[in-house]
Amino acid sequence: MHDTLALKNSHAEAIVRVVETAIDVGRRYQFFVWSQSHLQVLLPHKLAVCGAYQRTRKELQFELFNSVALPETVLDALVDGRGLLIQQLVGAWIDRQGKSLAIDVAQLEGAAFADLRLALLEAGLRELLVHGVSRPQRPRELESLFIFASPGQHSNPQQRMYLDLLLPHLHATWLRVQAVEREMKEAPPSARVTPGQTRAVVTERERQILSWMREGMSNQQIGEVLGISPLTVKNHVHKILQKLNANNRAHAVACAMSMNLLGRSRSDGGSP
């Protein structure tokens, strides 16, 4: 009983922190850090897909935040608003009349999902939790949609309850990020930091390591890709944290993204 009560108290504190810190989120990298902190206590996930309705395109546009390495084809499928996966998830969510939807990855049937299903399972992602916000009195017209992929079972009633509670804050925060990012793109060139200015902060090798850190790779995995020892990678990571004044790897990646050190993100159509 005592352990259960303590767990509930810690979750209650996490909910308060998620709500309190949401107001400070206005950029993609800030959203990433926000989602990796207190939100992880309530909704553990290794991949998040966030969609917002773009009135200029008259459709949902999706962006992806992930801490695991996945094939490009899988990442593309997860952000393709017109693709079969997103269309099926949207349809299934609408059929539940706006209630959160848990999808067992192993139950994604059909040849069209074979590669995606295998890649997600190999990455340890076994469930997709789907929830969103539709326009008032128009349940088939979505304003936002969120997909969380995790190794655990989001169908746990407690976690489903947390998502219901936090959905308004997820929705408002993601729309604010979209608005701020649009303003940044429309800002005069003189008000922006150019890639040439920012890349000088870290070396090319450190930038490579940051790119793989963004994909959630360990020091051992990065070392294997770059042909260097894990200890050398660890030393590079330590220097990166110092240069960016970051507290941890996720913070360093977020700082690097905010400074354009990694070039275009996947959400902008680029690659690590």
Image (cartoon, grey):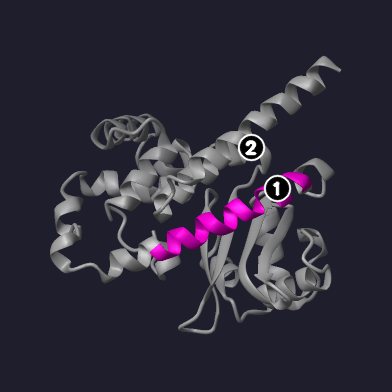
The residue singled out by tag 1 in the image is: 165
Q: Position of residue 18 (x, y in %)?
A: 57, 40
- Report the front residue among 135 and 33: 135
Residue 87 visible within the image: yes
The residue singled out by tag 2 in the image is: 15
- Report the front residue among 179 and 155: 179
Residue placed furthest toward the right: 1
Residue at x-position 31% and y-position 55%: 262
Q: In this view, does 244 lie to the left or right of 20?
A: left
Q: Dot 2: few (<14), some (14–19), or many (≥20) neighbours within 10 Å?
A: some
- Is the C-beta separation of discs 2 and 1 under 8 Å? yes
Amino acid marked by disc 2: Ile
Q: Is residue 175 magenta?
A: yes
Residue at x-position 19% and y-position 57%: 193
Q: In this view, does 258 lie to the left or right of 23?
A: left
Magenta region? 161-179
Q: Distance between the residues labelled 2 and 1?
A: 9 Å
